[in-house]
Amino acid sequence: MATPDSRNPRRASHFGGASEAPRAGQTGSIDDTMAPLPAAPKGATPRTTLRDGRVSGRTAAATQRATTRTVRRGGPGGGKSRAPLVVLALLAVAAVAAVVLVVVPALTAAPASDGTQEVVKGNQVTITIPEGAGAAAVADELFDAGVIASKSEFLAQARRTNAEQSLKSGSYTLTTGDDLSVILELLTTGPNASAKVTIPEGYTVSQTADAVEQALGIPADEFLAQAKASTYASDFAFLSGAADDSLEGFLFPKTYSFESEQPSADEVIRAMLDQFQAEVAPLDLAGAAASLSERYGIELSEYDVVTMASIVEREAVTDEQRPKVASVFYNRLRDGMRLESDATLTYYLGRAATAEEINSLDVPYNTYKIDGLTPTPVCSPSLASLEAAASPADTSFLYFYITQDTEQFSETYDQHQQAYS
């Protein structure tokens, strides 16, 4: 546990990991009577513009010579023949202007903003169209996945076939390079791929909602509104002690596949709770809580074990460290010491806490200020963390210092200070 200069020396655990928590353009005014000229290619002689009435030296000289010859041939009556030649000169100037203003820009114009790309035909890809995505957003998904070569062509085809308002959200298996009419028919018929979502270990309910939205198209707000312990407590006994009506800690981290083309938030949540129940059954969390209570002389519930596992998940880096980290926290509870875990306040704030916040914030998730465990778990723990919380290592450690590259467990504060000095 490092002691930054800006905070008081800590007497407990400190996890040194990172918290989980535009390009400016230029605008310019352009004369509304004429488009701006493109930049000349490097090394080329700049063209003169016609906006100020001037022409190139060569054109001016040619015009002068033509006028002079006309005057010599015309003699005294030559004034009557000058007008046609002046008209011809003006036409020549107009021709130059046309080249400058029309042909050159066409040759040097930048590609369309949406661009095109080479598509390798015949590959199978799976994409997920989020709920409420418009045609432009769908085009982006298809283009990024390498399914289509041009977003503008896709959108034009969607408009021609009146498919813009009929595109359906969900997961699709598509073939890259397919005809646009085939792709649009699939997207207007509905999802044709099994839905899949991966929840990493240590995710919070909020992060899980974001992952579900991204993978399955279920809006995060809809998922969070459904994710209430009271909704599922009658079907899952382990939720009977859940605080704040929260499912925090119980949406088990795993990859889930759904046969339904577009599962509901309820289906997804039930799958995660079913998985939690199956994973922890061999651990007998209720029995573990009773054994731990006797071992450490403190009263612990099954819910407390899950909460402890969630803190261990956020503090340890490797699975080998988890039983020892759990032992540190249980030893501190036994000795009447505060947990002093940075991870708990990080959960509350949604970002890493500052030294000032650690020392001043009097909230239920600041374990530098409160006794005991937090009101709820702080993430969905891995099975390894649940095992560590249910069966911690037998140690006398009261402190640890862990980074991505270093670990040091200590029995005394002096030893702990030496770990990061």
Image (cartoon, helix red, strand yellow):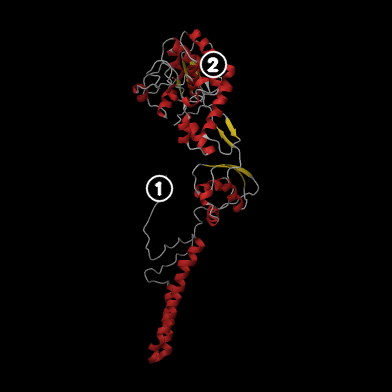
Mark 2: give few (<14), some (14-19) or many (20+) Cα within 10 Å: many
Which is more toward the observer, 246 or 124?
246
Residue 104 to residue 417: above or below: below
Residue at the limit of the structure toward the front, as seen here: 234
Q: Quadrant of residue 333?
A: top left
Left or right: residue 119 versus residue 419 is right
Residue at the limit of the structure toward the bottom, as seen here: 76
Find residue 285 and name its label.
Answer: 2
Q: Are marks 2 and 1 in contact (CB under 8 Å)?
A: no
Residue at the limit of the structure toward the left, as seen here: 360
Q: Residue at x 45, y 32 (%)?
A: 225
Say which residue label 1 marks: 24
What amino acid does circle 1 point to?
A: Ala
The picture places residue 87, in percent across and down from the top left corner, at 42, 80
Which of the two discs, 2 and 1, sits closer to the camera? 2
Residue 278 to residue 147: above or below: above
Which is more toward the observer, 394 or 98?
394
The picture places residue 264, in percent across and down from the top left corner, at 53, 35
Left or right: residue 181 versus residue 363 is right
User: How far apart, in angstroms, are the residues tagged by discs 2 and 1?
Assistant: 55 Å
**Count of number-bearing discs:** 2
The picture places residue 48, in percent across and down from the top left corner, at 42, 67
Mark 1: give few (<14), some (14-19) or many (20+) Cα within 10 Å: few
Q: Is residue 253 visible?
A: no
Q: Residue at x 54, y 32 (%)?
A: 268
Left or right: residue 348 versus residue 255 is left
Quarter of the C terminus within the rendering: top left
What amino acid does circle 2 point to?
A: Leu
Q: Is residue 257 visible?
A: yes
Which is more toward the observer, 49 or 311?
311
- Mark 2 vs mark 1: which is more N-terminal? 1
The picture places residue 241, in percent across and down from the top left corner, at 47, 19
